[in-house]
Amino acid sequence: MSKIQVVGAIIIKDRKLLAAQRASNRVLGGYWEFPGGKIEPSETPKEAMARELQEEFGAKATVFDKFSIDGIAELKFGEVVLHCYYVRLDSDITKTIAHDELRWVSPREALELSWAPSDVSVIKALAKTGFNYEY
């Protein structure tokens, strides 16, 4: 089974997390996730994170610390390994090309959403922090 390395952005503002619902016409459509995407062979995870946010949201971003755990899910198309990083948006979101909805959620609200399989362990651990991260 192939391993698919992906990155996810933990974007926190006023103790709320930016959650993104995958577009219904995509693989795992309707599930919630951390914004991000695949790491290209020539990229570091931090470079991939900045590129994905530019492509998907038209937003500039600064990538900070890596979250303490990775998310892993075995899906029919491969094993997804999710590396999450704390990210600050440095510009507005001007577009969404891969998501049907973006929502700022509290820890309690986040745990009520249906997250993509690779994101579940990360959101459970992250919610315990109270979304308390200083940039």
Image: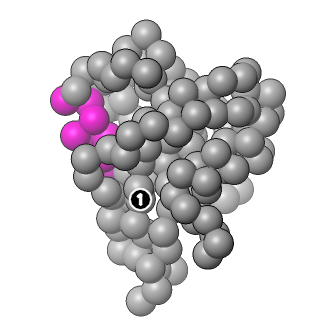
Q: Nearer the viewer, residue 103 or 81?
A: 81
The quadrant where residue 108 appears: top left
Q: Mark 1 points at which residue?
A: 82
Which residue reaches farthest left? 128
Tell me which amino acid carries mark 1. Answer: Leu
Q: In this view, does 109 lie to the left or right of 46?
A: left
Residue found at x 26% / y 30%? 127
Expressed as whole percent of the image width and height from the top left, the position of residue 20 reads: 56, 37
Q: What colour scheme does the image use?
A: one colour
The magenta region covers 120-128
Where 131 sits versus 115, above or below?
Answer: above
SS assignment at label 1: strand
Q: Is the magenta stretch mostly helix, strand or loop?
A: helix
Residue found at x 80% / y 27%? 94
Expressed as whole percent of the image width and height from the top left, the position of residue 116 reads: 43, 53
Where 112 sits versus 121, above or below?
Answer: above
Residue found at x 65% / y 72%? 42
The local crowd at label 1, few if under 14, some if 14 to 19, many if 20 or more residues have their Cα within 10 Å, is many
Where 133 sits versus 69, above or below?
Answer: above
Q: Which of 66 and 128 is in front in this view?
A: 66
Say whether residue 34 is visible. no
The quadrant where residue 126 appears: top left
Expressed as whole percent of the image width and height from the top left, the position of residue 35 reads: 56, 43
Expressed as whole percent of the image width and height from the top left, the position of residue 6 reads: 51, 62
Decide whether residue 17 is among the magenta residues.
no
Q: In this view, does 83 lie to the left or right of 91?
A: left
